[in-house]
Image: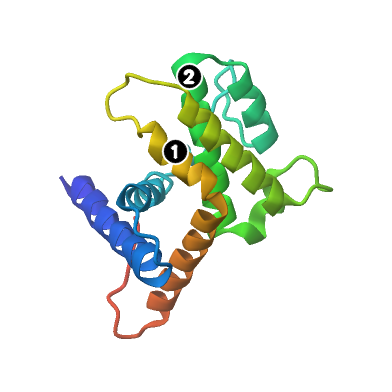
């Protein structure tokens, strides 16, 4: 029960900060996109969800280029799932931690931020074109909007990070702890 309470607390925190940032600060009033972004933050609190894409031998794929190769070798719902994960992975790093992107690319000569944006946008758009009948899956139109607005979503996540860093420096704010 304790873990469930923690997840709900985090869910409310991320939903509130995403709504404040996207709707109030940026003027982006698209609740499904805002909800998707806050759920992405919640999922990626657990590092195993960041590296969800696996090779056929079960090892996690940590390189963006390798993830694209894995996605391109799949069909149907599996292809959609991996492309969505690529989009999520790229959006997470480009949005929250762009300064660390050089660590996620095998090719140090490419511009990591730009590559992450291109791959992330492309991945969301590909995922949005693959129909799925799996219950609970993100609707294609939401993935398409995120793909088309990828850089705005990444910017929004940078603003989310600034907000929570600002709240960490507020001596009157309640401490935010993740166990």
**Disc 2 and disc 1: Cα gap in Å?**
16 Å
Q: Nearer the viewer, residue 90 or 56?
A: 90
Using the rendered image of the protein, determine whether residue 52 is visible from the camera's viewpoint. Answer: no
Q: Nearer the viewer, residue 9 or 162?
A: 162
- Indicate the position of residue 57 as horizontal and vertical percent values: 59, 16
Using the rendered image of the protein, determine whether residue 22 is visible from the camera's viewpoint. Answer: yes
Q: Secondary structure at mark 2?
A: helix
Q: Residue at x 38, y 76 (%)?
A: 167
- Indicate the position of residue 119 as horizontal and vertical percent values: 64, 39
Residues at discs 2 and 1 in contact (Cβ within 8 Å): no
Q: Nearer the viewer, residue 16 or 51?
A: 16
Task: State the residue position of label 1.
Answer: 143
Task: State the residue position of label 2.
Answer: 78
Task: Say which quarter of the image contains residue 72.
Answer: top right
- Classify residue 94 as left or right of residue 11: right
- Indicate the position of residue 176 as horizontal and vertical percent values: 32, 67
Q: What colour scheme governs how the chains and residues are painted in the rendered image of this protein?
A: rainbow
Up-down: is 168 above or below 117?
Answer: below
- Indicate the position of residue 138 as horizontal and vertical percent values: 35, 34
Q: Nearer the viewer, mark 2 or mark 1?
A: 1
Task: Say which quarter of the image contains residue 137.
Answer: top left
């Amino acid at each position: 029960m304790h873990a469930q309470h923690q997840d709900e607390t985090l869910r409310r925190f991320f939903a509130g900060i995403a709504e404040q940032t996207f709707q109030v600060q940026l003027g982006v009033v698209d609740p499904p996109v805002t909800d998707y972004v806050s759920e992405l933050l919640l999922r990626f609190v657990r590092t195993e969800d960041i590296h969800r894409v696996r090779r056929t031998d079960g090892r996690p794929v940590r390189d963006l280029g390798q993830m694209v190769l894995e996605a391109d070798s799949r069909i149907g719902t599996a292809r959609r799932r991996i492309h969505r994960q690529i989009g999520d992975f790229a959006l997470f790093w480009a949005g929250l931690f762009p300064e660390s992107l050089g660590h996620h690319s095998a090719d140090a000569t490419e511009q990591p931020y730009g590559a992450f944006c291109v791959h992330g946008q492309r991945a969301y758009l590909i995922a949005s074109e693959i129909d799925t009948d799996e219950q609970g899956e993100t609707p294609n139109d939401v993935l398409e909007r995120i793909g088309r607005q990828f850089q705005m979503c990444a910017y929004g996540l940078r603003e989310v990070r600034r907000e929570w860093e600002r709240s960490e420096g507020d001596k009157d704010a309640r401490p935010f702890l993740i166990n």
